[in-house]
Amino acid sequence: MMPATPPVKSLPPWAVWVIGVALLGAAWGVVQLTPSDDAIQAPFVVAASVGEKATARAFDVTVTDPRLGDTAFDQKGWYGDGTWLVVDIEAESRQVEQGALLGNIVFVSDGVTYTASERPSSALPLSLRTGIPQTGSVAFELPEGVAQRPGVIQISLDIETRLDSLVEVPIDLAELTRHDDVEMRATGWTP
Amino acid sequence: MDAVSAATWLRRNALALSAVAVLLPVTAAVVVGNEWWSANSGRDVFPVTVAEGESARFGGISWGPARASDAEPGENAELPPRTKVIAVDIPVDRHGKATTCTVTGLRETSGAQREWQVDTKTTDWNYRLQTFCKSESTVESGQSGPFTLSLPFVVPDDIDGPLAVDLVVIDELPRFLRVEVTP
């Protein structure tokens, strides 16, 4: 003969409602906490200010001396008229030289991305050396209106930044003095 | 289900349960191992280390004994500030074959394990010195026989202590040769 089953105690109706609402609230919370599809593949942002060394996964980089001008010129006789933002960068790889090609430097303002110009002779792309810093300039040719706005310089090895380090250096162009000519330095070993 | 019937069920299904216990981990290991192999079999993963001052045979080639020293760059060299040139000489004998080899780089064997590639340009290195194992066509034109790899590396001048040169012989991957040297 089967043993007698203990009597089943049921919860009071109000408790059922409280638990139900609590579970709904918890489910809403989990949905809020879940990263979006983009966030799962987002780059790891390394924030730095002008003049501060940023340490990314594979390289160190320092952005210095941002300057605005109507004409940019390099050390090989090239010059171009327009609205130019020129910055100096100093960079080295942290561990390996193989594959350490610094190839993506852009300026982002109001969600619009401006790639560094390929017209002048610049530090882009820069083949990084382990523990041996190199210095050079990059130039961004911008629409006139952007010269009054804040923006961010983004630096990474590759255009493909997903799940890799992305250095971000904010620059407010409105705070920069506008020059007639801005000079780009030759790319070479950091003295 | 009470304790007696649970024990009965376990006994009746013992064979199937032990098969699952074996097959599940084996399946997982085979799948993971297969993926790992297809991703890494063409890469330099397992070092075959040659201790300092010793010789070894690897990939049908006799290597060593290797020697590292601080070296003078060529006369047109423009070395970066605060750097020096380390030259690593590795005697190589391919025993009449023309097995090619490539140099991955010079690396620290401890600490940050930083790595530098061969740099003949910055060092203005003597172009007559061999910096890689030349291919078959060159050997056939009369350059067979033992020779010495003479590899220049530009490194920060605070580098000392044990280093190693990594060399790859394609047919031996994922094994590769790590020759230890101290400048």
Image (cartoon, coloured by chain):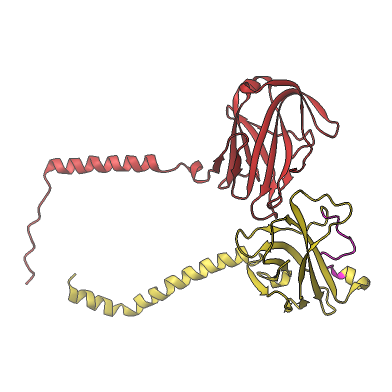
Chain colours: A red, B yellow
* Coordinates of residue A74 in the picture (x, y in percent): 80, 32
Q: Quadrant of the C terminus of chain A?
A: top right
Residue A86 appears left or right of B40: right
Q: Does the segment drawn in magenta span residue B130?
A: yes
Res B45 seen here? yes
Q: What is the tally of numbered marks visible in this picture?
A: 0
Q: Which residues are magenta?
A: B123-136
State the residue in front, A53 or B23: A53
Query: What residue appears at the point 76 percent right and 48 percent down from the top-left corner?
Result: B81
Query: What residue appears at the point 64 percent right and 42 percent down from the top-left corner?
Result: A61
Q: Quadrant of the N terminus of chain A?
A: bottom left
Query: What residue appears at the point 33 percent right and 39 percent down from the top-left corner?
Result: A28
Query: What residue appears at the point 47 percent right and 70 percent down from the top-left corner?
Result: B27
State the residue in front, A63 or B93: A63
Predominant SS along the magenta part: loop
As drawn, A167 above or below B61: above
Q: Quadrant of residue B165?
A: bottom right
Q: Does the segment drawn in magenta span residue A34?
A: no
Q: Quadrant of residue B105?
A: bottom right
As drawn, B182 above or below A117: below
* Coordinates of residue A30 in the picture (x, y in percent): 35, 43
State the residue in front, A178 or B167: A178
Res A124 seen here? no
The residue most toward the right is B141
* Coordinates of residue A125 in the picture (x, y in percent): 73, 43
Residue B13 appears left or right of A62: left
